[in-house]
Amino acid sequence: MLIDAMADNLMLLNHDGHWGGGEYWWIGRILMLIFWIVVIGLVFWWLRRNAWRRHEPTGIERAQAILVERYARGEIEEAEYRERLRNLV
């Protein structure tokens, strides 16, 4: 019973069906290769466009960074820093 099932599976794996055989089998292989190249290319294009892009800070984030730098350099006092930070948010 088990041997018969295995033999049937081997026959199915060996069967060319309507996709294989014939003199134009290579066209299907080339089309499949082109298909996968296009799919992989689209994935890389999407990743490069969306996922791998650097995060650009918003205007408020840039302003807060400048405010922190000015406070760290001692250009502004703590009270002025807190007031300007409160005005940004």
Image (cartoon, grey):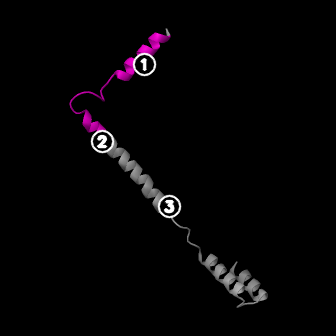
Q: Are marks 1 and 2 in contact (CB under 8 Å)?
A: no
Mark 1 or mark 2, earlier in chain: 1
Q: Secondary structure at mark 2?
A: helix
Asked if labels 3 and 1 touch by Cβ distance under 8 angstroms, the answer is no
Q: Secondary structure at mark 3?
A: helix
The Cα atoms of the two marked residues, 2 and 3, are separated by 28 Å
Amino acid on which disc 2 is placed? Leu
Whether 85 is drawn above or below 24: the answer is below
In three-dimensional space, the C-alpha distance between marks 1 and 2, rounded to whole angstroms, equals 27 Å
Residue numbers of the magenta segment: 2-29
Picture quadrant of residue 83: bottom right
Rendered image: mark on residue 40: none
Q: Which residue is mark 2?
A: 31
**Mark 1 = which residue?**
9
Residue to which mark 3 is pinned: 50
Q: Quadrant of residue 32?
A: top left
Q: Earlier in the sequence, mark 1 or mark 3?
A: 1
Is 43 included in the stretch rendered in magenta? no
Amino acid type for the residue under numbered disc 1: Asn
Where is residue 23? Give x, y as percent: 20, 30
Judge the density around disc 2: few (<14), some (14-19), many (≥20) Cα neighbours within 10 Å: few
| Residue at (52% x, 59% y) in the render | 51
Residue 76 quadrant: bottom right
